[in-house]
Amino acid sequence: MATEAIAREFTREDAATLDRRDPLARLREQFLLPEGLIYLDGNSLGALPKAVPQRIERTVRQEWGEGLIRSWRSEAQWMQLPKRIGAKIAPLIGAGADEAIVTDSTSVNLFKLLAAALALQRQRGRRVILSEGGNFPTDLYIAQGARDFLAGTPELRAVPTEGLVDAMSHDVAVLTLTHVDFRTGYRHDLDGLTAAAHRHGILTLWDLSHSTGIVPLALNRAGVDLAIGCGYKYLNGGPGAPAYLYVRRELQEQLRQPLAGWIGHRQPFAFETSYAPAEGIARMLCGTPTVLSMAALDAALDLWDGVSLADIRAKSVALTELFIRLVEAAGLAEVELASPRDPERRGGQVCFRHPEAYAVVQALIAQHVIGDFRAPDVMRFGLAPPYLRYVDVYDAVQRLVGIVCGRQWDKPEFRQRGAVEVT
Ligand SMILES: *Cc1c(COP(=O)(O)O)cnc(C)c1O
């Protein structure tokens, strides 16, 4: 009741005061954001950093146009991009510079690491993949593919969240989970589940797509074995940006991955006829680096120089708390919180259920607030601290409340379903 009263009295001026005190406020200037738009989809496709178009221009015109093939090895060092960008991601996930590398897509990296973990564990008589039924679809599909295509993997055990620890038996090879749930923002206890898995001799493979750049991560401290994550969400690497993968240092020499392409070879340019994996994490590479998209991600990552992830997390909690309080203070009959109420169990997004969630989200977009819809009835709002202000949250909630109270969503054009709904 007390918090409701506080929220009811909270004004736009109060939000502006929070913005003036925000230690991250300066970061917003480093993005190119459309005037008047409130962008609440930074968890799906991050906004465009100002540094990216300049970098793409340089990479295309100078490095490619003039340097041509020399740029693989000259100053541009194209061949080094996967490692160099991986080293920029490493501090964001609590890993050593030689434990992260940028390559391929999240889905492909999951397959490579899952297969590598299964091959290692098979020698120890462990053959089961353990995951949860609500995992992100690509994670489940890739695990199903691995089960069906890799010899001797009889089972994908996908259980409810509460059943994970009980399902950790002596036959489980690898536990693969998404740290922050794409639909609700539910955040797993990464440390606790990793420790429990290790007590049972199980390797852990975390999908950090909805965590990297928003939730402080300490993979080394937690002893995480393997991880993957996305470059285009909170890392702002651009549509279809390359993904990254992490392999704990001690495991690197023990793992072999199935997509044994030439760039992961010990000596790619010796053109030998048989495969020998590169030393360290480079063995997880497959083919030629996608230079143009890597250049975009590389430039986007410079934003994190000198940024404290503790500040990012503090603002993320403050923004999500404010969003929830303002919505709940409005007392909307049909709107129900779908994210965990405890910020400790939440990532960087807030979600609400509404029976007409799809139409409500369309009506919001018409009022220049971009959020998204997840079937069957979830409205999802990803709040990216580097470029979102407290006044944006205030204004977005005002419009949401207006749309729901005034049934402004109830129009044919807002009920019409479109074709693309990206993660
Ligand atoms: C966004 C996301 C992906 C993306 O996979 P792609 O291969 O880039 O399409 C994978 N897993 C999770 C949990 C995600 O949120």
Image (spheres, grey):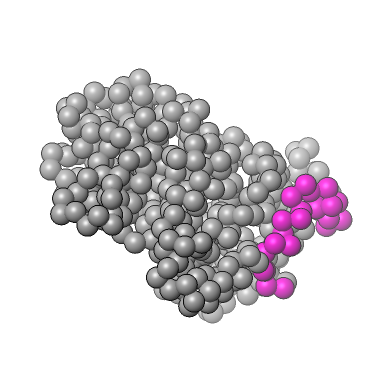
Residue 328 visible in the snapshot: no
Q: Residue 399 or 152: which is nearer the viewer?
A: 152
Could you tell me residue 213's position as x and y percent?
57, 48
Q: Quadrant of the C terminus?
A: bottom left
Tell me: residue 346, above or below residue 190.
below
Considering every residue shown, the one lying at the far left of the view is 151
Q: Locate the N terminus by quadrant.
A: top right
Q: Judge by depth and name the residue closer to the eye, 138 or 96.
A: 96
**Residue at left 59%, top 35%?**
344
Q: In the visual, does 288 lie left or right of 214?
A: left
Note whether 291 is above or below 110 in the view shown: below
Residue nearest the viewer, comparing 255 with 387: 255
Can the viewer see residue 217 in this picture?
yes
Residue 13 in magenta stretch: yes
Main SS, magenta residues? helix
Residue 197 image position (x, y, % from top left): 36, 26
Image location of residue 332, percent across then percent down:
66, 55
The segment highlighted magenta reads 12-35
User: Who's the residue at 56% across and 43% down the image?
Assistant: 92
Q: Is residue 288 magenta?
A: no
Considering only vertical position in the picture, is 14 above or below 48?
A: above
* Residue 386 x, y percent position in the rendering: 67, 54
Q: Residue at x 80, y 43 (%)?
A: 5
Q: Residue at x 49, y 51 (%)?
A: 84
